[in-house]
Amino acid sequence: MRGIRRISIKKGRFFYSTETCSARFPPNLEHLKQSTNLKHLHFVNLTNYEDGSKIQNYIIDQHITFKLLNKNSRAISSLLYPTVLTFEFNSVYTGGKRERDSKKATKIPIIDNITTLGVPYIQTDRGGQVTYHGPGQLVAYFIWDLKLWKNLTSKCFVNFIEKCSMNTISETGVNNVFKTENTGVWIFEPETKREEKISSIGLNIKRNVTSHGLSINLKPDLKYLNNPEFVMCGLNGYNQTSIEKELGNKYPIDLNVDKLGDILCDSLKTRMNNYMMNMPNENVYKLNVEKKTINLQQYSLDNELFKSIDDFIHV
């Protein structure tokens, strides 16, 4: 719990402050000064997890290639904007590095052959343990080069997207959104003293380029998230909830994964602008969101799709 300030709410209960990173993040490169774009790629319709991973890995490779070529000043024209990918996946269980490392000898072969709910399992390189993705859930991948900003450490970035997730959920009308010592976002119901998770976070960072990100439960089938066969995120004794469940009959009929992704990106923009503003002896910085919607049913995972992505994410 180092770095997380514990705040007592009432006798016997504690919430945890999210104010763990107070640094400001001025841009490092001239291309990012005064104005830049956060590129939001939203993929409509249900997407296979493997396809989402291929798209994410392609963009990561573009970032890594740029960093390797960066000693050549001519390569600066290929700078990539920070990018957010938003998906609604077909049902899948994914395991993080902690799951792979702690259960390599016994649990993984069992998970690989799961047939109880007819949902496949895929091992990933993100942090954390087992989680579920599926219809009714927003998944957002953040592909950002942290070195484009000063002081933006991996710890600060996790704290940043955690706060943005909390803001996004609160914007839908859900109350009692809070943070514990465990990464992610939780809901607390004072009358029932119920604590349930509503957003999970798991990242990977390579050469200071982030990948993977967060999921927010909008209106998924909770039987997959509260499956007794798995301990979601390695947390025994806790269930997951959703925005739909928390709002009940107050759930807006026009709220879908696409719109929730827009709310998230707006929160990212607002919070990052707050971090970047009012730097001593610096200009005022402003981040803007530019969105592109892609229907993978109109593409194969080939050069045509990747060229469309390239044209969008490069400066």
Image (spheres, grey):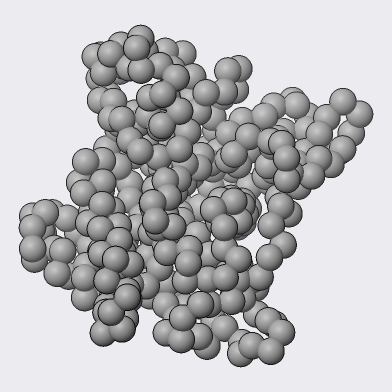
Q: Is residue 256 visible?
A: no
Residue extending farthest right: 11
Q: Is 213 left, or right, of 158 in this rendering?
A: left
Q: In this rendering, is residue 220 above or below 216?
A: above
Residue extending farthest front: 71
Give the image quarter of residue 126.
top left
The image quadrant where one finds the N terminus is top right
Residue 56: percent from the left, percent from the top?
A: 28, 53
Q: Residue at x 13, y 63 (%)?
A: 305
Q: Is 76 left, or right, of 163 in this rendering?
A: left
Give the image quarter of residue 95.
top left
Q: Residue at x 84, y 41 (%)?
A: 7
Q: Residue at x 26, y 18 (%)?
A: 112
Q: Is residue 281 visible?
A: yes
The image quadrant where one finds the C terminus is bottom left
* 46 vs 93, nearest the viewer: 93
Residue 158: percent from the left, percent from the top?
A: 56, 51
* 191 vs 284, nearest the viewer: 284
Give the image quarter of residue 223.
top left
Q: Residue at x 50, y 85 (%)?
A: 33
Residue 19: percent from the left, percent from the top?
A: 73, 54
Q: In this rendering, is residue 267 above or below 177?
A: below
